[in-house]
Image: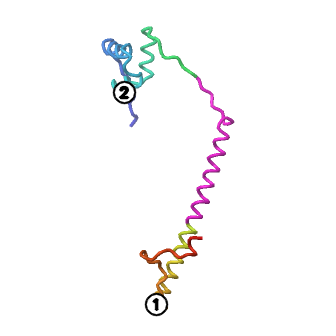
Amino acid sequence: MKERIKNYRYSQHFKDAVLKEVRNGKLSIVQISRIYNLSFVTVYKWMRENGIDTPEKETVYVDLKDHKGSLEKIKKLEDKIQSLQAALSDKILENCALEATVNVAKKKYGLDLKKKKDTPASRNAEK
């Protein structure tokens, strides 16, 4: 079954209410179109038909050359993040291996290699 397209016809009273909001200037055209469930293109069309000035359009040209330095900086930062994540993973593995060694030394040989909190630091540690 073919879907029917709805064609809306608005009364002049409804258009005047919308245009009154536009002239009031407290809301943007997009906000007004959302409130009244209209396309903002329809609101602009009504504004043109009723001689209401539309906002000036400003064209901004964006070129990739302008952002090339930013893209390179982002790439360098992403590479640095990856290297730091790899270094962190290595240190975590190293820490796990050292803890396992301490646990084996304690279980197998009865040695407690962990530093006690109440003992002072050794003289060699200060150097």
Report helix, strand or loop for mark 1: loop
When the figure is inspected, residue 70 is found, relative to residue 47, above or below; the finding is below
In the image shown, does 104 or 50 lie closer to the viewer? 104
Report helix, strand or loop for mark 2: helix
Closer mark to the observer between disc 1 and disc 2: 1
Please tell me which residue is depicted at 49% across the width and 17% down the height of the picture.
Answer: 55
In the image shown, does 87 or 64 lie closer to the viewer? 87
Does the magenta stretch mainly form a helix, a strand or a loop?
A: helix
Query: Residue 84: percent from the left, percent from the top?
Result: 59, 60
Q: Magenta span has 58?
A: no
Crowding near pointer 2: few (<14 within 10 Å), some, many (20+)?
A: few
Which quadrant of the figure contains the C terminus?
A: bottom right
**Is 127 left or right of 55, judged from the image as shown?**
right
**Residue 34 tag number:** 2
Which amino acid lies under the numbered mark 1 shown in the image of this protein?
Gly
Looking at the image, the residue that sits furthest to the right is: 65
Crowding near pointer 1: few (<14 within 10 Å), some, many (20+)?
A: few
Q: Which residue is mark 1?
A: 110
Which amino acid lies under the numbered mark 2 shown in the image of this protein?
Arg
Say which quarter of the image contains residue 7: top left
Which quadrant of the figure contains the N terminus?
A: top left
In the image shown, does 49 or 54 lie closer to the viewer? 54
When the figure is inspected, residue 47 is found, relative to residue 92, above or below; the finding is above
Looking at the image, the residue that sits furthest to the top is: 51
Say which quarter of the image contains residue 97: bottom right
The magenta stretch is 59-88
